Image (tube, rainbow, N blue to C red):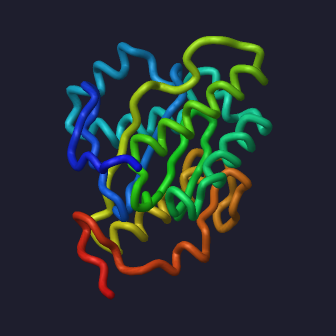
């Protein structure tokens, strides 16, 4: 069993890790943004919005555009759903993944994301007959402050393929979904508010 770390960092981005906290997580392929562009984005006031727009433009090799690699990624996201975490929504884009997830007691967000990335990188590299970094080492996470923030984030995740021109409005793609069962969740805990009994 791993202890939650609260606020922590690994030298890149700050992270918040606490059980039963709903988080919006984005992780991206290693070549999805050129290094010089990442440095330029760091100085912009709306860096996250700008980075998201650039990711949606489909830079890099876009290995997740490959149906086999996208399916592999979705399988690993679903694998420990209900055991280590509750997966509320996810979206697999050509060069990045968005997930809305609540970690369960005894499992940290960093360990969950590490397991997703570790397994998919080994399998994807093997299937693509390549070596080297598959995922960017770090990930972005934001805890959900309240129910409204959660619902807007889920809507964003589900509509991201449409916004990027990869799907039609009002339809779900095989790369975007939310668990209807999981949306019927208890009130939020963690920094967004206490759970009611």
Query: Considering only vertical position in the picture, is 79 above or below 96?
Result: below
Residue 129 x, y percent position in the rendering: 77, 15
Left or right, 1 with reference to 182: left
Using the image as rendered, state which of residue 22 and residue 20 is in the foreground.
20
Q: Look at 70% across and 35% down and name the residue there.
A: 65
Q: Quadrant of residue 119?
A: top right
Q: Look at 50% across and 52% down and name the residue there.
A: 99
Left or right, 195 with reference to 109: left
Which residue in the rendered view is the most extreme toward the bottom?
197
Left or right, 33 with reference to 146: right
Left or right, 168 with reference to 99: right
Q: Quadrant of the C terminus?
A: bottom left
Q: Look at 60% across and 76% down and name the residue there.
A: 181
Residue 29 x, y percent position in the rendering: 54, 28
Using the image as rendered, state which of residue 145 and residue 10 is in the foreground.
10
Q: Look at 52% across and 64% down and name the residue there.
A: 88
Residue 9 x, y percent position in the rendering: 24, 34
Residue 141 x, y percent position in the rendering: 35, 46
Using the image as rendered, state which of residue 155 and residue 190 is in the foreground.
190
Q: Quadrant of residue 164?
A: top right
Total marks shown come to 0
Q: Quadrant of residue 43?
A: top left
Using the image as rendered, state which of residue 64 and residue 81 is in the foreground.
81
């Amino acid at each position: 069993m791993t202890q939650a770390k609260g606020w922590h960092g690994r030298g890149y981005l700050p992270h918040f890790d606490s059980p039963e906290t709903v988080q919006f997580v984005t992780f991206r392929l290693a070549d999805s943004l050129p290094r010089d562009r990442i440095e330029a984005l760091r100085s912009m006031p709306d860096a996250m919005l700008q980075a998201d727009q650039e990711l949606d433009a489909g830079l890099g090799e876009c290995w997740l555009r490959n149906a086999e690699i996208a399916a592999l990624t979705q399988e690993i996201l679903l694998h420990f759903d209900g055991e280590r975490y509750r997966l509320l929504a996810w979206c697999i884009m050509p060069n990045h993944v968005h997930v809305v997830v609540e970690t369960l007691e005894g499992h940290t967000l960093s360990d969950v994301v590490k397991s997703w990335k570790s397994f998919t990188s080994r399998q994807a590299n093997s299937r693509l007959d390549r070596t080297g970094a598959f995922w960017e080492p770090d990930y972005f996470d934001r805890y959900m402050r309240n129910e409204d923030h959660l619902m807007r984030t889920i809507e964003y995740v589900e509509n991201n393929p449409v916004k990027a021109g990869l799907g039609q409005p009002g339809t779900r793609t095989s790369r975007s979904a939310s668990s209807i069962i999981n949306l019927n969740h208890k009130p939020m805990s963690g920094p967004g508010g206490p759970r009611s009994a």
